[in-house]
Amino acid sequence: MSMPVIGFIGLGIMGKPMARNLMKSGYPLVVHNRSRPSVEELGKEGAQTAASPEEVMLRAHILITMLPDSPDVEQVYAGERGIFTAGKPGTLLIDMSSISPVVTRKLAAEAETLGLEMLDAPVSGGEAGAISATLSIMIGGEASAVERAMPIFQVLGKNIVHVGGTGAGQVAKAANQVVVGVTIAAVSEALVLAAKAGVDPAKVREVLLGGFAQSKILDAHGQKMLERNFKPGFRIRLHEKDLKIALGAGGEYGVPLMVTGLVAQMMSAMRSMGSGDLDHSGLVTLIEQMARFELGQKLV
């Protein structure tokens, strides 16, 4: 049997390598993006290109969206020349963006009235995971739709979990972003403390990696902090957005997220100072500014 045509909307830092991996696996692809350069780039590599989400929907059997925020997803699905305007029953919609569970559930309900299946399947792993196809994928929706989508998920990621019903994937992603954000802040404070106390922060990271404080954040992002490499794999302003989603969910369900709130404020401060497009490991620069000491600086 021929492979289904996949529509892919949203070719940013994460979306473009994900779309490219699908093409490498043999899937015919129809792509669309708000800005044209990424569309033209993938078009030269063999993807079909489309002028609108509606056109993608008309030409695809399965459609994936990978967009920055809830309003972007709502516009692409329900806006003018959006996905829902095509009215093509039987199409499977997979939103891999990180957005509000409330918005996810609203769009999924509208999709159902149109005879469409919809999954929320946000991811974790950053640009590196998107490129290497090792993303962690958190899925919400019906089991039958998950089964239909599983061959696609297996191209894009390694840790693939059907968390629960519609919106469950987004709740899991909010929880993920809480853990990642709080841990980045903790690693930032620990390394700057070590450096200003006159201890080599690289050696501190090395010894902590062998103990109970070990984490992927300390490993990968701690190294980025030491190298002062803040090229965005995941931007601070997007992580701030995700923490606000988590805080909104906390308010909805009566769960106090006090530490999350503080880290969200730190990221808001970074964005206000013009640093929102740094990688989220760049949060260390805020600690450095307050400590008046950079990791590479030598005590006099």
Image: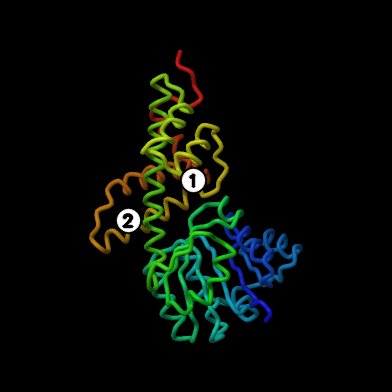
Quadrant of the drawing holding the N terminus: bottom right
Earlier-in-chain disc, 2 versus 1: 2
Residue found at the very far top of the displayed protein: 300
For the point 27% across and 48% down, which residue is it?
A: 258
- Seen in the picture, residue 60 relative to 132 is either above or below; the reply is below
Q: Nearer the viewer, residue 195 or 106?
A: 195
Query: Going by the image, does 209 lie left or right of 262?
Result: right
Query: Which residue is tagged 2?
Result: 247
The amino acid sitting under disc 1 is Gly
Q: Residue at x 75, y 67 (%)?
A: 46
Residue visible at 60% across and 79% down in the picture: 61
Is residue 173 found left or right of 132 in the rendered image?
left
**CA distance for labels 2 and 1:** 19 Å
Residue 4 vertical position relative to residue 46 in the rendered view, above or below: below
Residue found farthest to the front: 210
Q: Position of residue 214 (x, y in %)?
A: 41, 39
Q: Which residue is mark 1?
A: 276
Which disc is residue 114 wearing? Answer: none
